[in-house]
Image (spheres, coloured by chain):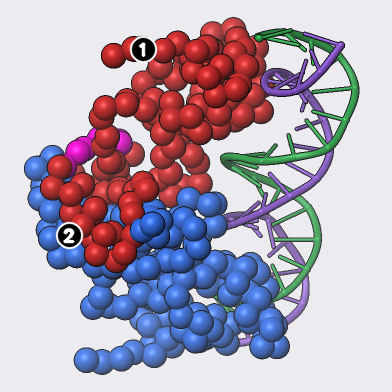
Chain colours: A red, B blue, C green, D purple
Amino acid sequence: METRTLKQILHKEGFRYTPQRQMVWDTLGKMGGHHDCEEIYDALREKGNRVSRATVYRTIEVLARNGLLKKLEVGDGVARYEVRNEDEHHDHMICLETGDIIEFYDKDLERLQEEIVQKHGYTLVRHVHQLFVRKKS
Amino acid sequence: METRTLKQILHKEGFRYTPQRQMVWDTLGKMGGHHDCEEIYDALREKGNRVSRATVYRTIEVLARNGLLKKLEVGDGVARYEVRNEDEHHDHMICLETGDIIEFYDKDLERLQEEIVQKHGYTLVRHVHQLFVRKKS
DNA sequence: GTTGTTGCAAATACTTTGCAACTAT
DNA sequence: ATAGTTGCAAAGTATTTGCAACAAC
């Protein structure tokens, strides 16, 4: 149940701990939800932090590579990120009317996917499951 | 069991029937599988057809909008397209080692998705389900 | 003849990269 | 001191768009 600090995690992976990385991480944590780099960049600048877009992109990449963030691509050409919660996996439901992104998890669904993949002689590494929906009329 | 020609379909939707659109459609049909615009463009030029990239992009868009093509985005920033088969739906399994795209369909999975969406008060419009896999070792 | 379509090149949108200055270790 | 990181602007990649010439209806 050890909660490592960002500094510890970065060091363990051979990366350096910098104020910019901490800022990006903190901001993402405070924002919650799913955000693209531009939003993160704007949020940082608004709070008076001096960071470059390039650093945001690079930091996001480092954080995602180390499992701290989860990348979400909805198909509009913009990558969004969310803080990854170790012990909680979920997929997304995207409302076509409002753009809302709703998280969901279904045990049976997860199991079924594994079975399908196994049946084909593969091992499941990760998956993307997005349900594009509309409010029930 | 009426198989409409591309010409008929386009006309019905208020679009014009042009040799370029027919070429793109034919090429996609002959190629089979999943291809991005550049591949379609190249295939066309190799066969001596004079088409512009812009027309390929625009034609693909028209065909996809009218349900003739299915767009597939794997997360590498390139949209791929495949000829849509009216009465056959499938999802994709992407091999991380070889890049192979395997199609699969599972009835239970489809049903389960519907249930989940309903449970949240929505209607399922479409979905993206991609399983990123690795050959069983 | 009208209006949609094409081709070209320029523009766009998001993301990546080269490089010199800088900073964590 | 060394090697990774930053910021900037420039480059990249995939895709879209303005517009004049053109072709479908």
Q: Mark 2 points at which residue?
A: B110
- In-front residue for pair C10/C17: C17
Residue B1 locus on image (x, y percent): 22, 91
Q: Which chain carries label 2?
A: B
**Res. B39 visible in picture:** yes
Compared to A33, does A26 lie above or below?
above
- Residue bounds of the magenta highlight: A100-106
Question: With A67 as the anchor, is A103 left or right in this view?
Answer: left
Q: Does the magenta stretch include residue B79?
A: no
Rendered residue at 33%/54% (across/down)? A123
Return the residue found at the far front: B137
Residue A71 locus on image (x, y percent): 44, 37
- In-front residue for pair B71/A126: A126
Rendered residue at 12%/60% (across/down)? B108
Looking at the figure, which quarter contains the N terminus of chain A?
Answer: top left
Label 1: element kind? loop
**How busy is the neighbourhood of tag 2: few (under 14 within 10 Å), some, or many (20 plus)?**
some
Q: What residue type is labelled 2?
A: Glu
Q: Which chain carries label 1?
A: A
Residue A47 locus on image (x, y percent): 54, 8
**How busy is the neighbourhood of tag 1: few (under 14 within 10 Å), some, or many (20 plus)?**
few
Q: Is residue A104 magenta?
A: yes
- In-front residue for pair A50/A100: A50
Rendered residue at 36%/27% (across/down)? A84
Q: What residue type is labelled 1?
A: Thr
Compared to A30, does A62 lie above or below?
below
Q: Name the residue under label 1.
A: A3
Compared to B77, does A42 lie above or below?
above
Q: How far apart are marks 2 and 1 (CA)?
A: 38 Å
Which picture quadrant has residue D21?
A: bottom right
Compared to B50, does B72 lie above or below?
above
